[in-house]
Image (spheres, rainbow, N blue to C red):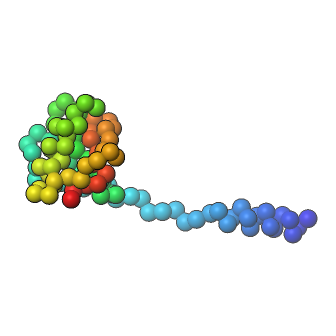
Amino acid sequence: MRVLLAAFVLASLAGCTEPSAPAAPPQPVEKGLAGYTALKGPGGELIVKRAGTPFGESDGAEAKRAANSFCGTNGAVTGTEDNFRDGAWIFPGGCA
C-alpha cells in the first residue's frame, strides 16, 4: 500500500514545473504616423492603436497604413494572422 501511495505522489509531482518568468510588458515604438501609437509586444508582434476613437474591426487598412509608418521602409509583416482586439489591430509578424 505504501508503495502505491509513494508512486502516486511521485507521479503527481512529475507534472510540476517551476513557474515561468512573467512576460515583458509591450514596449512603445517611437516614430510613426501622428494620431496613432504602436507597441512592440513580448512575442515581437506590433500592436497599433488610434488616438481618440479606438479602431473598429473594419479599420484594418487604416491600421496597416499606420503600422507601416511605425516600421519604416520595410513596413509591417501582414497576413491572415492579423487580428483586431479591444480597439487595437495586432500584427503578429511585427516589422519586416
Residue 7 visible in the displayed image: yes
The quadrant in which residue 30 appears is bottom left
Looking at the picture, how far across and down is residue 55, in whole percent? 23, 33
Q: Residue at x 15, y 44 (%)?
A: 66
Residue 37 visible in the displayed image: no
The quadrant in which residue 25 appears is bottom left
Q: Residue at x 31, y 38 (%)?
A: 84
Left or right relative to 57: residue 73: left
The quadrant in which residue 23 appears is bottom left
Looking at the picture, how far across and down is residue 46, in whole percent? 25, 51
Q: Where 56 falls versus 72 (above or below)?
A: above
* Residue furthest out toward the left: 34
Looking at the picture, how far across and down is residue 52, in whole percent? 16, 32
Q: Residue at x 34, y 46 (%)?
A: 81
**Quarter of the figure with the C terminus:** bottom left
* Residue furthest out toward the front: 80
* Residue furthest out toward the right: 1
Left or right relative to 23: residue 8: right
